């Protein structure tokens, strides 16, 4: 039951970000974009993840230590979702939100090593 509760809280957090999810654009260093009781959304800096030298925003949603869900709190501060967005890409809030949802496998019992999703 707990993993379904985790997933629901994770997706609610993403859905409630709305256009704030684009707040990372223009940032160059670690910065908190948004948070709630269960999760925080951070821009972890710029990274170069391919041989072409393209730069990407390294975006992560992490479990908060003070989560209101006891079983989720035990997972803190694990990363629940990770998305890389090309700094030159024109992205929409729904694209970034969907990438975060896709980056976390709902079948996992815990948030461990979310898949990396690239938005070009």
Image: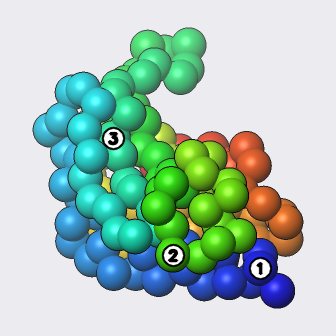
Mark 1 residue element: helix
Q: Which comes sooner in the sequence, label 3 or label 1?
A: 1
Using the numbered discs, state the Cα–Cα distance from disc 3 to disc 1 in whole angstroms.
27 Å
Q: How crowded is mark 1: few (under 14 residues within 10 Å), some or many (20 or more)?
A: few
On the image, the x and y values in percent for residue 5 come to 68, 84
Height in image: 77 above or below 51? below
What number is the disc on residue 68?
2
Report the residue at 38% width, 33% height from top: 44
Mark 3 crowdedness (10 Å alpha carbons): few <14, some 14-19, many ≥20? many
Q: Mark 1 and mark 3 in contact (Cβ < 8 Å)?
A: no
Q: In which quarter of the image is the N terminus?
A: bottom right
Look at discs 2 and 1 and give the one toward the viewer.
Answer: 2
Q: Is 80 rendered above or below residue 7?
A: above
Judging from the image, the colouring scheme is rainbow
The residue to which callout 1 is attached is 2
Relative to 26, say whether 115 is above or below: below
Position of residue 88 relative to residue 7, above or below, is above
Q: Earlier in the sequence, mark 2 or mark 1?
A: 1
Q: Which residue lies furthest to the left in this view?
A: 26
Q: Residue 43 carries which label?
A: 3
Which dot, 2 or 3, sits closer to the camera? 2
Tell me the SS state at disc 2. Answer: loop
Q: Can residue 22 be seen in this view?
A: yes
Q: Which residue is drawn at 27% across and 46% down?
A: 32
Quadrant assignment for the C terminus: top left
Q: Position of residue 36 (x, y in %)?
A: 35, 69
Q: Which of 91 and 7 is in front in this view?
A: 7
Q: Earlier in the sequence, mark 2 or mark 3?
A: 3
**Which residue occupies 21% across, 27% down?**
28
Residue 65: image x %, image y %? 50, 54
Q: Which mark is residue 94?
A: none
């Amino acid at each position: 039951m707990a993993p379904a509760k985790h997933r629901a809280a994770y997706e609610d957090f993403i859905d409630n970000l709305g256009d704030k999810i684009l707040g990372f654009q223009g940032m160059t260093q670690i910065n908190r974009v948004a948070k709630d009781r269960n999760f925080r959304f951070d821009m972890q800096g710029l990274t170069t993840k391919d041989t072409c030298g393209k730069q990407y925003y390294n975006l992560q949603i992490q479990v908060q230590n003070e989560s209101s869900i006891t079983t989720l709190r035990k997972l803190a501060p694990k990363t629940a979702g990770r998305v890389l967005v090309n700094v030159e890409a024109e992205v929409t809030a729904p694209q970034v939100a969907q990438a975060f949802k896709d980056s976390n496998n709902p079948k996992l019992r815990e948030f461990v090593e979310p898949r990396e999703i690239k938005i070009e």
